[in-house]
Image: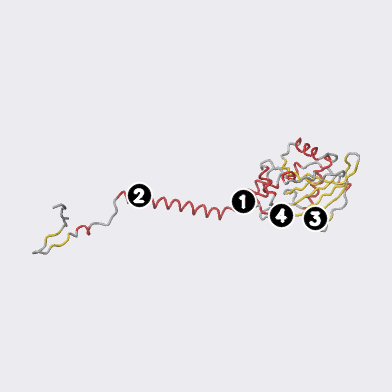
Amino acid sequence: MFFNARKNGYDAGDGPVRYLDGSSLTRPLEAPRPQMLAMAAFVLAAAVIGGVFLFNVIDNVTHSAERARATVEQNLARPASMASLPNLASLVGLNAEGVKAAFAESGWSIADKGALSGDESGNLDLIKLPDDVSEAQALLMYSNVSGLSAADATLLLNGSWQFTWEAGDSANMRVKYADFSSGSVEAAVQTAIASEGFDPATAGEMAVDESGNTFQEGTVAAGDATYHWRVSAIKLSSVYDIKGLPDTAVYVGIRLYA
């Protein structure tokens, strides 16, 4: 024969009847030990991964707000914008390059927003950067401040200011910044006046303009001429709609003009 006949296991029975061997059906239904160990390891790994994922989800939900507040507080502990404001009266008579040179001599990191936007008017639009924020990062943030989180907003605004200067024969310059430490609009106005060295005796009474800005105006001598100054302030929440910022934060503008 070319093929061997397949031999089936039979139990002998009475007479010519043969029964299939059913002993294999009575064996315990257990997987081999190596496969059992592999399955146990797989189940354990899945449980660990699931536990880590669940922990991260719960941690993010319960502690994200707490971490955000801590980051805001850390950012506000950095040097304030008022600590490095340019003295506007000292810039009277300088041209655009002279202003830039004066800022460079002060050791400030400055981003030329006007130049980057292609402004060829001769005016200046400069941003003083916080020490721990890069130029690219600051310009990106300034493009949409209202879209920032409270943590990013305090990182950008505390320690920075924006300076604008108009080319021409008459002085006309401004510096704007956020004040997180004065505590009120009125106090922020007084802080700005003191920071610039303006004489309060030349100022009129504090008032509120049609836009809701609290302001005070006066005069200052620079060179052989007398110039006008105006300090105005309003709650920061009126300028930027950012949740999580201190309610006492103030937006301040200082202008010096002929």
Residue underneath mark 2:
38
> Which residue lies at the image location 35% right of the left edge and 49% below the top edge?
38
Work out whether mark 4 precedes mark 3 in sequence or the reverse, and give the earlier one.
3
> Residue 135 sits in which quadrant?
top right
Type of amino acid under label 3: Asn
Work out whether mark 2 precedes mark 3 in sequence or the reverse, and give the earlier one.
2
Residue underneath mark 4:
240
Mark-to-mark CA distance, 2 and 1:
43 Å
Q: Position of residue 139 (x, y in %)?
A: 69, 46
- Give left or right: position of 56 versus 111: left
Question: Is the Cβ of the residue at disc 2 closer than 8 Å to that at disc 3?
Answer: no
Q: Residues within 10 Å of mark 3 (few under 14, many from 20)?
A: some
Residue 200 lies, with reference to residue 105, above or below; the image says below
Work out whether mark 3 precedes mark 1 in sequence or the reverse, and give the earlier one.
1
Residue underneath mark 3:
213
- Give left or right: position of 32 versus 156: left
> Which residue lies at the image location 86% right of the left edge and 50% below the top edge?
217
Q: Residues within 10 Å of mark 4 (few under 14, many from 20)?
A: some
> Which residue lies at the image location 15% right of the left edge and 62% below the top edge?
19
Q: Position of residue 221 (x, y in %)?
A: 89, 42
Label 2 residue SS: helix
Mark-to-mark CA distance, 2 and 3:
72 Å
Label 1 residue SS: helix
Type of amino acid under label 4: Tyr
Q: Position of residue 192 (x, y in %)?
A: 79, 46
Type of amino acid under label 2: Ala
Label 3 residue SS: loop
Mark-to-mark CA distance, 3 and 1:
30 Å
Q: Residue furthest left?
A: 15
Work out whether mark 2 precedes mark 4 in sequence or the reverse, and give the earlier one.
2
